[in-house]
Amino acid sequence: MLYQFHETTRSLLSPFVYWSQANARMFSESGSWMSRLPGAERVAASYELMHRLGKDYEKPEFELHQATAHGQQIAVIEQTVVDDPFCRLLRFKRYSDDPSTIDAMKNDPVVLVVAPLSGHHSTLLRDTVRTLLQDHKVYVTDWRDARMVPLQAGDFGLDDYIATIRRFIAEIGAKDLNVIAVCQPTVPVLAAVSLMASAGETTPRSLVLMGGPVDPRNNPTQVNSLATTKPLQWFRSQLIHIVPSNYPGHGRRVYPGFLQHMGFIAMNPSRHFESHWDFYGHLVRGDLEDADGHRRFYDEYNAVLDMPETYYLDTIEVVFQRHLLPRGEWDVAGERVRPQDITNTSILTIEGELDDISGLGQTRAALDLCSGVKPARKRHFEVKGAGHYGIFSGRRWRDKVYPEVKAFIRGAK
C-alpha cells in the first residue's frame, strides 16, 4: 500500500510540479516580459526549486559520445553486448581515424566495471568510465530497475548476481580481463572470481576492489550498524513493498527506490538542505555555472531504482548480518566460496580515508582472504581526504586514484 500511496501522491502533485516549471521559465527566459519585472530572479528561483524538489527523476543516460584517448579526441559509441532481464552488459566502443591512435588503442587493457546495485543507476559511475576510456577498453554492468522487470522474468537473488558476473566475464574473456568492482559489488565479484578459481577456470588478470563491505565488522559505519541492530524480518516487513500496476514489474516485491532515497538524505540532511539553499542563491545571483553543477549532481543523485526483494534481503543477511564471506562459511549454489583458491589474479584494494559507508579496513580485508595470491601481486591504496564517492568520482579519483589503478592494471601479470 505504501508504494501505491507514493505513486498516487506523485500523480496528484504532478500538475503543481509542471506549473512550477512553467512559471520558472516565464520569470527567467530572456524573451519573456515577466523576466523584466522587479524581483523576477527570486520568483524564478523559488519556482525552479519547488519544481526540482517535487519532480520525478528518470534514469539518466551516460551520454559519453566523445573521450580523450592517447592525447586525441575520439568518438565513443555505447553498445549492448548482453541483454539480460535484470542487467545489460554495455561496451563503450572507441573509434578514431588517426592510425597511430588506432594502433595504441588496440593494445589497451580490457576493463569490466561492475557498478553497484544499491539504489543508484550505473550512470553514477559516469566519471569513472569517462576517465578509464583514456587508456582502456571499457565494459560496464547496467543493472535494471526492478520495477521495470516483468514478473515472468523470475526472481533475482545474490546467487543470481554472482552468476551474472561470471557469465559476463566469460562473455568478454577472462584471460586478459581486469575487473573493477565499486562499493557493493566487491563482495559478489570476489565470490564470483573465487568460484571460478575453485572450478579450475581462468580467472581475470586483475581485480580492483573499491570501497566495499568485504568484512563490515571492521570499523562499522552507520550503514553497517542499521543492518546488525534489526532482525531480517524487520527489513522484510518494513522495507519491502509491491510494485504498483502502472509499471511493467507490477506485483514484484522490491525495496523501492524512493525509500532508499529517503535513507540517503537522512544520513546527512543538513548538507542537502544547505545545497538546495545555495542553489536558490546561485539562481538569484545569476551564478549559472554553479546552479548547473547543482542540477547535474541532483539529477543523478535523485534518480534511484528499486531492488529485487530476494537480492536485497540476501545481501543484508549474507554480507552485513552473518558475515559469511570473511568467516569462510558462504555457499553459493551449493559451492563454498573460497577466496584462498585464487592464485593467478592480481588484487588491488582501495579505500577512502573518510568513507562513511564502508569503513577503513572493510575492503582491505580481501587481501588477507586471498591468501593464495603472492604478496607481490597484492596492493592496498588509501585515499587521503576522500569520502566514499571521492574514490571513484571527481578530482581525487582523476588525480590520485586513477593513476594508481592504471599503473596496477598495466603491471598485472
Image (cartoon, rainbow, N blue to C red):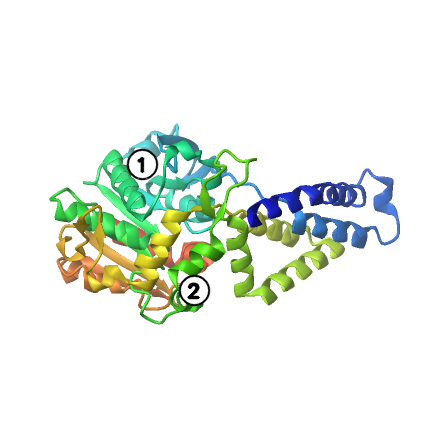
Left/right of residue 238 with respect to residue 112 in the rendered view: right
Disc 1 is placed on an element classified as helix
Q: Residue furthest top?
A: 97
Determine the residue positioned at 40% across, 59% down: 233
The residue type indicated by label 1 comes to Met
Choose top left, top right, bottom left or bottom right for residue 29. top right
Determine the residue positioned at 29% across, 64% down: 215
Determine the residue positioned at 30% across, 43% down: 160
Camera-side residue of 180 and 229: 229
Q: Which residue is mark 1?
A: 105
Q: Residues within 10 Å of mark 2 (few under 14, many from 20)?
A: some
Q: Nearer the viewer, mark 1 or mark 2?
A: 2
Q: Which residue is mark 2?
A: 223
Left/right of residue 389 with respect to residue 91 in the rendered view: right
Residue 20 location, x and y as percent? 75, 45
Q: Is residue 269 visible to us here?
A: yes
Q: Is residue 272 above or below residue 74?
A: below
The residue type indicated by label 2 comes to Val
